Amino acid sequence: MSISSVAQIRTLLASLPGEDEAAIAAWAAREPQLTKPAGSLGRLEDLGRWLSAWQGRHPARLGRVCARVFAGNHGVAALGVSAFPPEVTVQMVANFRHGGAAINQLCNTFGTELQVIALDLDRPTADFTQGPAMDEAEFVAAFQAGMDAVPDDCHLLCVGEMGIGNTTPAAAIPCALYGGEAGFWTGRGTGVDNDGLDRKTQVVAAGVARHVGQSGIDILRCLGGRELAAMAGAVLAARLKRVPVLLDGYVCTAAVAPLAAENPAALDHCVVAHASAEPGHRRLMEKLDKQPLFDLGLRLGEASGAALAVGVVRAALACHTGMATFAEAGVSDS
């Protein structure tokens, strides 16, 4: 899939594949026969259905689970919105590639393939308080990088990011899409002090004031970053390839919210892995009608929450496929 314009992205979003009804029917035929009270495994049952519905097969598979971490740098970082300098993005990408980060340990633990995609780290996006963060060509190139990162034979995709300053665009995007004061959406990110939080909130407000009123994809282009555009591209490619997606925290969810602004069904194949400690994340999930799988106070990024959720999804599939039925076990079901 190759794109060359925002118009092509909108065309793809206008006609998306839905759930596979035959796979759902096969799941629904087996699930009530398993040796447990109906509904007793709660969301694990829902996850089993979700995997089959979006993979388009029953039983679902988790042979190749992929984590993709996209990294980018931001022009607004120069405005004092982060507790860390932009060069930390480059340093952390190196750490990922050497296996030293949290995401490496989580992927190793749950059998997940990790790839880190760095996007022009020596060329930050523009300061979105002065103009669009990216022109159309820059945006499309980043979006395409995300689309290209999803293998055809991937069974489950975890999406995450690294980018100093990127909780600022993460706050600006939902503020522009859904309204409200900038402070309603803006949190401390990597841990800025009160003065830093005030600066960050002012930057979000200025950016939104400049770009509000545009469509979802243009909001992402004007207020986002390359790694946010790439995450959106990966999620769209996953939909087209019938790959269910685990979204990470606030930045990841904000990156894909513009897809839902263009097509309300665009994120139906996505599950939010966890509720971030960033206060805006819960508010954004409410807007998207998404319930996180867990709430552990995580705010790391890196796809860490999504990678952790792989263990839960694997457990869901194991229960659905491995449990005996009442007939097999010789247990009365009434």
Image (cartoon, rainbow, N blue to C red):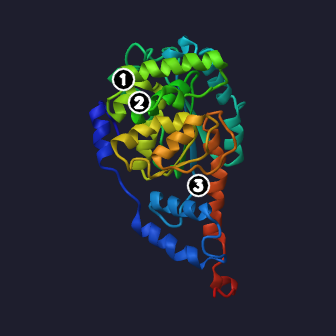
- Circle 1 Cα neighbour tier, 10 Å, few/some/many (<14 / 14–19 / ≥20): many
| Quadrant (top left, top right, bottom left, bottom right) of the N terminus | top left
Which percent across, then down, holds residue 321? 61, 69
Q: Residue at x 51, y 29 (%)?
A: 171
Q: Quadrant of the C terminus?
A: bottom right
Which amino acid lies under the numbered mark 1 shown in the image of this protein? His
Label ID, residue 247:
none
What amino acid type should be assigned to the residue bearing mark 3? Gly
Q: CA distance from mark 3 to mark 1?
A: 43 Å
The residue beneath circle 1 is 211
Q: Residue at x 65, y 76 (%)?
A: 37
x then y, percent, for residue 224: 45, 26
Mark linked to residue 63: 3
Spatial CA span between label 1 and label 2? 8 Å
Tag nearer the camera, 3 or 1 = 1
Q: 180 or 83: which is nearer to us?
A: 180
Residue annotated with mark 2: 176
Is 298 placed above or below 171 here?
Answer: below
Give the structural element (helix, strand or loop) at label 1. helix
Helix or strand or loop: what does disc 3 sit on?
A: loop
